[in-house]
Image (cartoon, rainbow, N blue to C red):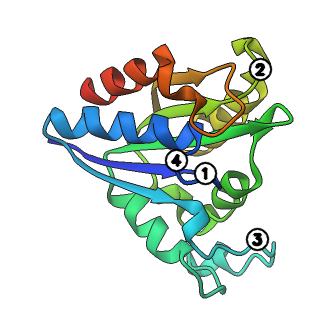
Amino acid sequence: MKKVLIISGSPRKGGNSDMLCDQFMKGAISAGHTVEKIRLAEKKIGFCLGCGACNQTHRCIQKDDMTELLDKMVTADVIVLATPVYFYTMNGQMKTFIDRCVPRYTEISHKDFYFIVAAADTDKDMMRKTIDSFRGFTADCLDDAREKGIIYGVGVWQKGEIADSSAMTEAYDMGRAV
């Protein structure tokens, strides 16, 4: 049994990328894993101040929800990062979250990562910058981060349009295969 942490960057509860997170979660739970989903929109996370204090202390000077989220990332076996794609990259909530991982990023090691992206564009290639940004964080900055899968929710704009997409089944199956 693995401990799965899903980070949903969707500002819309029940938005397309958020719905894919729910399907991934259902699949992982059905396989017997422990799963927690966190919606960044429901958390207080300030922007990185670039002060450098965390370089020595491994703690951020800001008092917000990021301390708790970093604890969860360190103890998770599997981390799912999900974002809607805005102007061909991750949304601001997800980027802020990643930036705030600095105090403890060296402890976020030996993890399996899954990426979930949803966009109005129908071409998966147009989401390359988003995936490259996720990889810049995981593959380039974290020790022994293993990319295990990507779920592309394409051609969805309005909230809930993903419901009839094959990406929903793919998300469930990928969660089940964790």
**Between discs 1 and 3, the one toward the N terminus:** 1
Q: Quadrant of residue 155?
A: top right
State the image coordinates of residue 43 (x, y, percent, origin top left).
56, 72
Instruction: Give percent across and percent down for residue 107.
Output: 45, 58
Name the amino acid type tagged 2. Asp
Calculate the distance from the C-alpha at mark 1 to the C-alpha at mark 2.
Answer: 18 Å
Q: Which residue is mark 4?
A: 14
Query: Marks 4/2: CA distance?
Result: 19 Å
Q: Secondary structure at mark 4?
A: loop
Residue type at mark 1: give it. Answer: Gly
Regarding mark 1 in the picture, which secondary structure is present there?
Answer: loop
The three-letter amino acid code for the residue at tag 4 is Gly
Which residue lies under the disc numbered 1? 9
The disc, 3 or 2, on the residue closer to the chain's N-terminal end is 3
Image vertical order of residue 105 relative to residue 122, above or below: below
Task: Name the residue beneath numbered marker 2.
Answer: 121
The answer to whether residue 152 is above or below residue 31 is above
Residue 123, quarter of picture: top right
Q: Which mark is residue 47?
A: 3
What is the secondary structure assignment of the residue under circle 3?
loop
Q: How far apart are labels 4 and 3 at the CA level?
A: 25 Å
